[in-house]
Amino acid sequence: MESSHRNLAHQVVHELGKKILQGTYKVGDSLPSEADLCTEFNISRTATREAVKMLSAKGLISSRPRQGIKVVESKHWNLFDVDVLNWILIGKPDLYLLRHFLQLRLAIEPEAAFLAAQYKQDSDLVAIENALVRMKDATNGQDDTHEADIEFHQSILSASNNPFFIQLTNFITTALKVNIRFTNRMIPVTLAEYQAHVDIFEHIKNSEPQAAFDSAMVTQKATLEIVNKQIEALENKKV
Amino acid sequence: MESSHRNLAHQVVHELGKKILQGTYKVGDSLPSEADLCTEFNISRTATREAVKMLSAKGLISSRPRQGIKVVESKHWNLFDVDVLNWILIGKPDLYLLRHFLQLRLAIEPEAAFLAAQYKQDSDLVAIENALVRMKDATNGQDDTHEADIEFHQSILSASNNPFFIQLTNFITTALKVNIRFTNRMIPVTLAEYQAHVDIFEHIKNSEPQAAFDSAMVTQKATLEIVNKQIEALENKKV
DNA sequence: ACAATAGTATTTATAATACAAATAAAGTTG
DNA sequence: CAACTTTATTTGTATTATAAATACTATTGT
């Protein structure tokens, strides 16, 4: 039990959550009973039960007398929960998962840009511009590429001033991390990519919702197309 | 403590969750300490702590020694959690919340239709068509309007075959319920509305992603426009 | 006066134990 | 063999005790 978590219950949540998302415990599987978890982790029932309750609150497991603790259908999992997203990241994401992430990003981010152009505050513009500066620095190797990129996307969601879009920050962040893992480029962002981001910012700043939407859309579509082609190639090779 | 919940801890979760989403406990506020919650609900510390853990797993509260139990910033709330969405519904949703729901629906549903047209299975088409039949019956008053409508939207998300879109079923369902509450029409769906849904289905069935997207988009845009106008009118009246 | 330090009190964290309630599975009966 | 009863297992709840974390208070030295 490694990890830097606040307390025992949280550590157990983390361990079990990881195993569920990795597929060590599959949908329908039973987890060890409370008693067994106690001995496995060498903790009291109090801590064990609190962990079980937290995981059930995240929609991963059910826990009922005599039936035990079971992994529930994945449609019940709170996939937009920060922890769950991190556990997804710990498991080995494949190309199909990357595509699923990109498909939802394609839905979310252009519309977020649209809303940002409509409802942004001055402070939102400052935040987006800060991220852009960091990205420009990154092209010169003076800042971290990925962090700046993530910050840019986050600041646009924030500028939508819609709580639901803002809550999706976790999702988008994880999606970007998965993306990074696959492209695996340690190189700085290209100027072309930087310019695409600047375009989106300008449209938001100038209150041009549709233009902001379109700019965000083309970038996303292009990325998704690449992955679709990769999957196609992979499937042809297999057959 | 009314409600038909499984056990004490869940009842407390429900009571406190409602109060947080209603604003009885506001962001930054302290909830009663564990000891006080025990006496307030007349239950043991075990049950109380389990409830607190569940709420913190849903991102609503933090609980730390000496600092007590506090409502955290709303950006940490898991707004896509089934329970949280239901608590939103219990509180009195206003026009602004309705708009927020519609804005995200506008992002999600057209893209879901797009994906459904690409990735649907035969069983998905059956499910969508079933919902359509129920809607047609509803126009004749032979079935429940709203249930059929909800089922239609759910079946399209399901047909996207993307787990993230599928997990958003809870969100869309709640959004539809909020919408129903505001339009408050107990009348059957109109034929025009029914036809719009049929169009989407046909495009999905014929594997026409862009057409499915566009059909879904126009409907959503129209609904959002109406609400935007309502809010505008409301704000002009106030000033 | 005040900054650094040490002490205190409050609140959550964990453990251990006991019993209650739910329920799946086995056994019994008509 | 179907309906019912019993039993065993597992989670649910309560209680008590102690540990750990930390906000607050008091002290101390300059």
Image (tube, coloured by chain):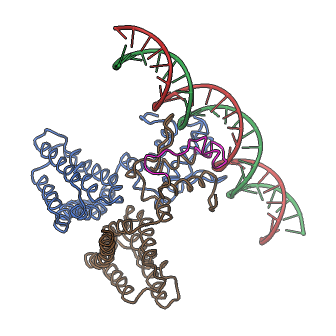
Chain colours: A blue, B brown, C green, D red
Question: How far from the left and from the top, in percent, is residue A237?
Answer: 26, 60
For image coordinates 25% across by 64% down, the residue present is: A115
In magenta, the rendered stretch is B25-49
Q: Position of residue B228 (x, y in %)?
A: 30, 72
Q: State the image coordinates of residue A94 (x, y, percent, origin top left).
A: 32, 54
In the image as oriented, which residue stretches furthest toward the bottom? B140
Residue nearer the viewer, B39 or B140: B39
Is B221 on the left or on the right of A53, as rendered?
Answer: left
Magenta-colored stretch includes residue B80: no
Residue at left offset 47%, top offset 56% = B23
Residue B229 picture quarter: bottom left
Residue A229 visible, this angle? no
Quadrant that contains the C terminus of chain B: bottom left
- Drawn side of residue B131 relative to residue A189, left or right: right
From the viewer's perspective, tell me whether residue A86 is left or right of residue A230. Answer: right
In the foreground, B221 or B225: B225
Q: Is residue A86 visible?
A: yes
Near-viewer residue (A133 or B34)? B34
Image quadrant occupied by the N terminus of chain B: bottom right
The number of numbered discs placed on residues in the rendered structure image is: 0
Whether the magenta-drawn stretch holds residue B29 is answered as yes
Relative vertical location of residue C30 with respect to residue A42 in this rendering, above or below: below
Residue A153: x and y, percent?
24, 53
